[in-house]
Image: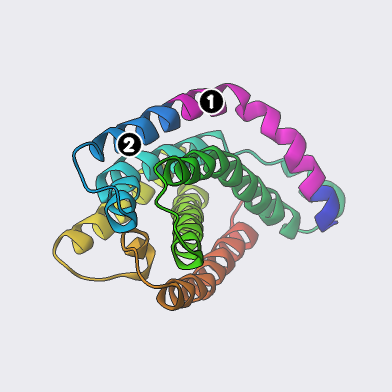
Amino acid sequence: MIFNVFKQQVHYMSLYVKVFGIANIIVVLLVASNLMATVGEPIVFNTVYAQMFSKFAIGITYLPLTFLIAISHISYRFSDYLTIGTRQILFYQILFQSLLAQFILWIPWAILTTASFVGLRTITDLQSLVILLLGLVQVYFIQLFLVLIGLIGFMLTAQKPIGIFIAISINLLFFSLHQVGISIPFWKFTDSEVPFVKVINCLSLLPMLYIISAILNAIVKGRDY
Protein backbone atom coordinates (compact mmCIF):
# COMPACT_ATOMS: atom_id res chain seq x y z
CA MET A 1 0.00 0.00 0.00
CA ILE A 2 2.76 2.43 0.96
CA PHE A 3 4.59 1.98 -2.35
CA ASN A 4 1.37 2.53 -4.33
CA VAL A 5 0.63 5.70 -2.39
CA PHE A 6 4.15 6.95 -3.07
CA LYS A 7 3.74 6.36 -6.82
CA GLN A 8 0.39 8.14 -6.70
CA GLN A 9 1.94 11.19 -5.05
CA VAL A 10 4.75 11.26 -7.62
CA HIS A 11 2.05 11.70 -10.26
CA TYR A 12 0.44 14.43 -8.14
CA MET A 13 3.61 16.50 -8.48
CA SER A 14 2.37 17.50 -11.94
CA LEU A 15 -0.12 19.74 -10.13
CA TYR A 16 2.82 21.74 -8.79
CA VAL A 17 4.66 22.32 -12.08
CA LYS A 18 3.73 25.98 -12.53
CA VAL A 19 4.36 26.96 -8.94
CA PHE A 20 7.65 24.99 -8.90
CA GLY A 21 8.78 27.08 -11.87
CA ILE A 22 7.98 30.32 -10.06
CA ALA A 23 9.69 29.05 -6.91
CA ASN A 24 12.86 28.19 -8.85
CA ILE A 25 13.04 31.73 -10.21
CA ILE A 26 12.80 33.07 -6.66
CA VAL A 27 15.46 30.61 -5.49
CA VAL A 28 17.85 31.73 -8.24
CA LEU A 29 17.32 35.37 -7.26
CA LEU A 30 17.77 34.51 -3.59
CA VAL A 31 21.06 32.69 -4.15
CA ALA A 32 22.26 35.46 -6.47
CA SER A 33 21.50 38.11 -3.82
CA ASN A 34 23.36 36.05 -1.21
CA LEU A 35 26.35 35.86 -3.55
CA MET A 36 26.27 39.61 -4.08
CA ALA A 37 26.34 40.05 -0.30
CA THR A 38 29.76 38.34 -0.25
CA VAL A 39 31.27 41.10 -2.41
CA GLY A 40 33.78 43.02 -0.35
CA GLU A 41 33.85 40.32 2.32
CA PRO A 42 36.76 37.91 2.92
CA ILE A 43 36.18 34.90 0.67
CA VAL A 44 36.56 32.28 3.38
CA PHE A 45 34.22 29.42 4.26
CA ASN A 46 32.71 30.85 7.44
CA THR A 47 31.97 34.22 5.85
CA VAL A 48 30.35 32.66 2.77
CA TYR A 49 28.37 30.25 4.97
CA ALA A 50 27.01 33.15 7.02
CA GLN A 51 25.77 34.85 3.84
CA MET A 52 24.38 31.78 2.06
CA PHE A 53 22.60 30.52 5.20
CA SER A 54 21.50 33.98 6.30
CA LYS A 55 18.65 33.98 8.80
CA PHE A 56 16.92 36.63 6.70
CA ALA A 57 17.38 34.95 3.32
CA ILE A 58 16.52 31.44 4.50
CA GLY A 59 14.31 32.09 7.49
CA ILE A 60 12.26 35.00 6.18
CA THR A 61 12.23 34.30 2.43
CA TYR A 62 13.02 30.70 1.50
CA LEU A 63 11.25 28.80 4.29
CA PRO A 64 7.94 30.71 4.03
CA LEU A 65 8.01 30.15 0.26
CA THR A 66 8.33 26.39 0.70
CA PHE A 67 5.57 25.86 3.25
CA LEU A 68 3.25 28.32 1.50
CA ILE A 69 3.48 26.26 -1.68
CA ALA A 70 3.15 22.91 0.06
CA ILE A 71 0.19 23.77 2.28
CA SER A 72 -1.75 25.75 -0.32
CA HIS A 73 -1.47 22.93 -2.89
CA ILE A 74 -1.93 19.92 -0.62
CA SER A 75 -4.62 17.48 -1.76
CA TYR A 76 -5.75 13.97 -0.93
CA ARG A 77 -8.30 11.51 -2.30
CA PHE A 78 -10.99 10.76 0.25
CA SER A 79 -12.35 8.09 -2.09
CA ASP A 80 -9.25 6.01 -1.32
CA TYR A 81 -10.31 5.87 2.33
CA LEU A 82 -13.74 4.61 1.31
CA THR A 83 -12.15 1.99 -0.96
CA ILE A 84 -9.43 0.74 1.39
CA GLY A 85 -11.31 1.28 4.65
CA THR A 86 -8.54 2.91 6.68
CA ARG A 87 -7.74 6.57 7.23
CA GLN A 88 -4.06 5.68 7.35
CA ILE A 89 -4.10 6.00 3.56
CA LEU A 90 -5.02 9.68 3.86
CA PHE A 91 -2.11 10.31 6.21
CA TYR A 92 0.31 8.59 3.82
CA GLN A 93 -0.99 10.69 0.93
CA ILE A 94 -0.47 13.93 2.83
CA LEU A 95 2.91 12.89 4.22
CA PHE A 96 4.40 11.64 0.94
CA GLN A 97 3.10 14.61 -1.00
CA SER A 98 4.72 16.97 1.52
CA LEU A 99 8.03 15.05 1.46
CA LEU A 100 8.17 15.08 -2.33
CA ALA A 101 7.13 18.71 -2.72
CA GLN A 102 9.71 19.87 -0.19
CA PHE A 103 12.42 17.76 -1.78
CA ILE A 104 11.71 19.17 -5.24
CA LEU A 105 11.80 22.70 -3.84
CA TRP A 106 14.96 21.98 -1.84
CA ILE A 107 17.05 20.35 -4.58
CA PRO A 108 17.50 23.46 -6.81
CA TRP A 109 18.37 25.60 -3.79
CA ALA A 110 20.80 22.99 -2.46
CA ILE A 111 22.52 22.59 -5.84
CA LEU A 112 22.85 26.32 -6.43
CA THR A 113 24.11 26.90 -2.89
CA THR A 114 26.70 24.14 -3.22
CA ALA A 115 27.74 25.48 -6.63
CA SER A 116 28.24 28.91 -5.06
CA PHE A 117 30.64 27.52 -2.47
CA VAL A 118 32.51 25.59 -5.15
CA GLY A 119 32.64 28.60 -7.46
CA LEU A 120 34.05 30.77 -4.70
CA ARG A 121 36.58 28.02 -3.93
CA THR A 122 35.73 27.92 -0.23
CA ILE A 123 35.45 24.10 -0.05
CA THR A 124 39.08 23.55 0.84
CA ASP A 125 38.88 20.30 2.81
CA LEU A 126 36.56 17.46 3.80
CA GLN A 127 35.41 19.21 6.96
CA SER A 128 34.10 22.27 5.12
CA LEU A 129 32.27 20.02 2.64
CA VAL A 130 30.62 18.04 5.45
CA ILE A 131 29.57 21.24 7.26
CA LEU A 132 27.97 22.53 4.06
CA LEU A 133 26.11 19.27 3.34
CA LEU A 134 24.84 18.97 6.90
CA GLY A 135 23.70 22.60 6.79
CA LEU A 136 21.67 21.77 3.68
CA VAL A 137 20.12 18.79 5.49
CA GLN A 138 19.22 20.98 8.47
CA VAL A 139 17.31 23.34 6.19
CA TYR A 140 15.41 20.44 4.61
CA PHE A 141 14.41 19.15 8.04
CA ILE A 142 13.04 22.52 9.11
CA GLN A 143 11.12 22.75 5.83
CA LEU A 144 9.41 19.46 6.70
CA PHE A 145 8.79 20.54 10.28
CA LEU A 146 7.08 23.80 9.32
CA VAL A 147 4.98 22.10 6.63
CA LEU A 148 3.83 19.39 9.04
CA ILE A 149 2.97 22.03 11.65
CA GLY A 150 0.94 23.91 9.04
CA LEU A 151 -0.82 20.70 7.96
CA ILE A 152 -1.80 20.01 11.57
CA GLY A 153 -3.49 23.42 11.62
CA PHE A 154 -5.15 22.70 8.28
CA MET A 155 -6.43 19.27 9.33
CA LEU A 156 -7.78 20.64 12.61
CA THR A 157 -9.69 23.49 10.98
CA ALA A 158 -10.13 22.39 7.33
CA GLN A 159 -8.81 25.86 6.43
CA LYS A 160 -5.55 26.14 4.47
CA PRO A 161 -5.08 29.85 5.35
CA ILE A 162 -5.14 28.91 9.05
CA GLY A 163 -2.53 26.21 8.45
CA ILE A 164 -0.33 28.71 6.62
CA PHE A 165 -0.82 31.27 9.40
CA ILE A 166 0.25 28.73 12.04
CA ALA A 167 3.37 27.81 10.05
CA ILE A 168 4.23 31.50 9.62
CA SER A 169 3.70 32.13 13.34
CA ILE A 170 5.96 29.24 14.39
CA ASN A 171 8.65 30.35 11.93
CA LEU A 172 8.52 33.93 13.24
CA LEU A 173 8.72 32.59 16.78
CA PHE A 174 11.88 30.66 15.87
CA PHE A 175 13.28 33.78 14.21
CA SER A 176 12.53 35.92 17.28
CA LEU A 177 14.16 33.42 19.64
CA HIS A 178 17.22 33.33 17.40
CA GLN A 179 17.36 37.12 17.37
CA VAL A 180 17.52 37.30 21.17
CA GLY A 181 20.21 34.63 21.32
CA ILE A 182 18.11 31.63 22.38
CA SER A 183 19.49 28.58 20.60
CA ILE A 184 16.90 26.15 19.24
CA PRO A 185 17.59 23.03 17.15
CA PHE A 186 15.50 24.08 14.16
CA TRP A 187 17.46 27.27 13.58
CA LYS A 188 20.97 25.90 14.01
CA PHE A 189 21.37 25.86 10.22
CA THR A 190 22.63 29.45 10.46
CA ASP A 191 25.75 28.33 12.35
CA SER A 192 28.80 26.83 10.61
CA GLU A 193 29.56 24.48 13.49
CA VAL A 194 31.99 21.58 13.38
CA PRO A 195 30.67 18.38 11.74
CA PHE A 196 30.15 16.52 15.04
CA VAL A 197 27.85 19.25 16.36
CA LYS A 198 26.04 19.40 13.02
CA VAL A 199 25.45 15.63 13.07
CA ILE A 200 24.10 15.77 16.63
CA ASN A 201 21.75 18.56 15.63
CA CYS A 202 20.47 16.66 12.59
CA LEU A 203 19.91 13.52 14.67
CA SER A 204 18.06 15.54 17.33
CA LEU A 205 15.65 16.82 14.71
CA LEU A 206 14.54 13.34 13.62
CA PRO A 207 12.58 12.47 16.80
CA MET A 208 10.89 15.87 16.63
CA LEU A 209 9.82 15.22 13.06
CA TYR A 210 8.56 11.78 14.08
CA ILE A 211 6.49 13.24 16.94
CA ILE A 212 4.96 15.90 14.71
CA SER A 213 4.17 13.25 12.08
CA ALA A 214 2.52 11.06 14.74
CA ILE A 215 0.39 13.99 15.89
CA LEU A 216 -0.67 14.68 12.30
CA ASN A 217 -1.50 11.00 11.85
CA ALA A 218 -3.67 10.98 14.97
CA ILE A 219 -5.52 14.09 13.80
CA VAL A 220 -6.14 12.63 10.35
CA LYS A 221 -7.53 9.45 11.89
CA GLY A 222 -9.74 11.30 14.34
CA ARG A 223 -11.07 14.00 12.03
CA ASP A 224 -14.69 14.03 10.80
CA TYR A 225 -14.85 13.88 6.99
Write the residue at 37% across / 70% down: 185
Stretch of the chain drawn in magenta: 6-25
Return the residue at label 1.
19
Please name the amino acid that badge 1 sits on. Val
Q: Does label 1 or label 2 sit earlier along the sequence?
A: 1
Q: Nearer the viewer, residue 162 or 172?
A: 172
- Neighbourhood count class around disc 1 (C-alpha, 10 Å): few under 14, some 14–19, many 20 upward: some
Write the residue at 77% across / 49% down: 6
The image shows residue 129 at horizontal and vertical percentages of: 49, 60
Q: Nearer the viewer, residue 111 or 209?
A: 111
Q: Nearer the viewer, residue 156 or 114?
A: 114
Taking the image as shown, residue 48 lies to the left or right of residue 208, namely: left
Q: Which secondary structure type mostly characterizes the magenta part of the structure?
A: helix
Q: Quadrant of residue 116?
A: top left
Taking the image as shown, residue 40 lies to the left or right of residue 58, namely: left
Give the secondary structure at mark 1: helix
In the displayed structure, 180 sits above or below 103; it is below
In the displayed structure, 46 sits above or below 24; it is below
Mark 1–mark 2 distance (CA, rounded to whole Å): 24 Å
Q: Nearer the viewer, residue 179 or 135?
A: 135
Write the residue at 48% across / 55% down: 136
Residue 158 visible at all: no
Residue 5 visible at all: yes
The image shows residue 25 at horizontal and vertical percentages of: 46, 24
Instruction: Choose mark 1 or mark 2, whichever is in front.
Output: 2
Q: Does the magenta-highlighted stretch encompass residue 147? A: no
Q: Are marks 1 and 2 in contact (CB under 8 Å)?
A: no
Return the residue at label 2.
35
Q: Quadrant of residue 201?
A: bottom left
Taking the image as shown, residue 121 lies to the left or right of residue 102, namely: left
Please name the amino acid that badge 2 sits on. Leu
Q: Does the magenta-highlighted stretch encompass residue 22? A: yes
